[in-house]
Image (cartoon, helix red, strand yellow):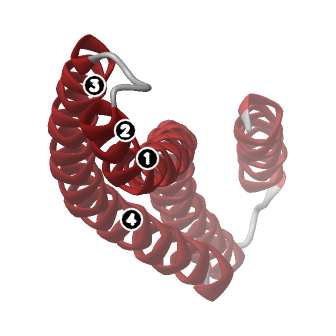
Amino acid sequence: MKRLITFFLLSFAFLILISSQTIAQSTNPGAGRSQEQSLQDLVNEVRQLRVLLQRINLTVYKTNVVVERLKFQQEVVTRLSRELNDVRENLSDTRSQISKMKELIPRLEKGVETGTRSPDELTGLKLELENATEREMRFVQRETQLMNDLSIERSKLLELNDQLNKLELDLTAR
């Protein structure tokens, strides 16, 4: 970008130098006026180019900022997705454990009634079931929270993608 600006400025300076020498060498006053108009047109065009370059530079800067934000947002969405998957796996495992414990409790109760099992085993299993049920509730709450967070972060990611698309259109329109 700096090379392009430098090139335009050097070209502009070179044209001014050549134009001023040509004007100085001209003896025809009408020809000087025409050259002066050409020089003014050239100056105007260089100014327009400068404005265009400034707009392009600003758009490139904005694009870079949006791209960095987009990368960060993608990392957030990826992290939340992984965390949600982990919570779902833990929830599934906990539910499986609860199901097995619920199946085992009636057998232990029969064993306690017949005297083949200790009442402490049954009490321990019921306590373990209660802990697993509490863990399940925490996992369900965490899953709900993560799904909400993930939805919000995905919408932010979509907004950033839209911004990037608009900036891309802005760059290609020029």
Upstream in the sequence, badge 1 or badge 3?
A: 1
Viewer can see residue 75: yes
Q: Nearer the viewer, mark 2 or mark 4?
A: 2
Q: Residue at x 38, y 37 (%)?
A: 111
- In this picture, residue 99 sits left or right of residue 123: right
Alpha carbon distance from label 1 to label 3: 12 Å
Do residues under tags 1 and 2 come within 8 Å of each other at their CB atoms? yes
Upstream in the sequence, badge 2 or badge 4?
A: 2
Tag 2: Cα neighbours inside 10 Å, few (<14), some, or many (≥20)? some
Alpha carbon distance from label 1 to label 2: 6 Å
Instruction: Find numbered disc 2 in the image and state the secondary structure of the residue it sits on.
Output: helix
Q: Residue at x 42, y 73 (%)?
A: 158
Instruction: Find numbered disc 4 in the image and state the secondary structure of the residue it sits on.
Output: helix
- In this picture, residue 39 sits left or right of residue 84: right
User: 46 and 98: which one is in front?
Assistant: 98
Q: Would you name the residue on which mark 2 appears?
A: 108
Q: Nearer the viewer, mark 4 or mark 3?
A: 3
Counting from the top left corner in percent of width and height, residue 45 is at 58, 69
The answer to whether 38 is drawn above or below residue 96 in the figure is: below
Q: Would you name the residue on which mark 1 appears?
A: 104
User: 12 and 106: which one is in front?
Assistant: 106
Three-letter amino acid code at disc 2?
Leu
Q: Nearer the viewer, mark 1 or mark 3?
A: 1
Upstream in the sequence, badge 2 or badge 3?
A: 2
Tag 4: Cα neighbours inside 10 Å, few (<14), some, or many (≥20)? some
The answer to whether 112 is drawn above or below residue 91 in the figure is: above
Q: Would you name the residue on which mark 4 appears?
A: 154
Counting from the top left corner in percent of width and height, residue 61 is at 50, 42
Q: Would you name the residue on which mark 3 appears?
A: 128
Three-letter amino acid code at disc 4?
Arg
Q: Residue at x 31, y 70 (%)?
A: 155
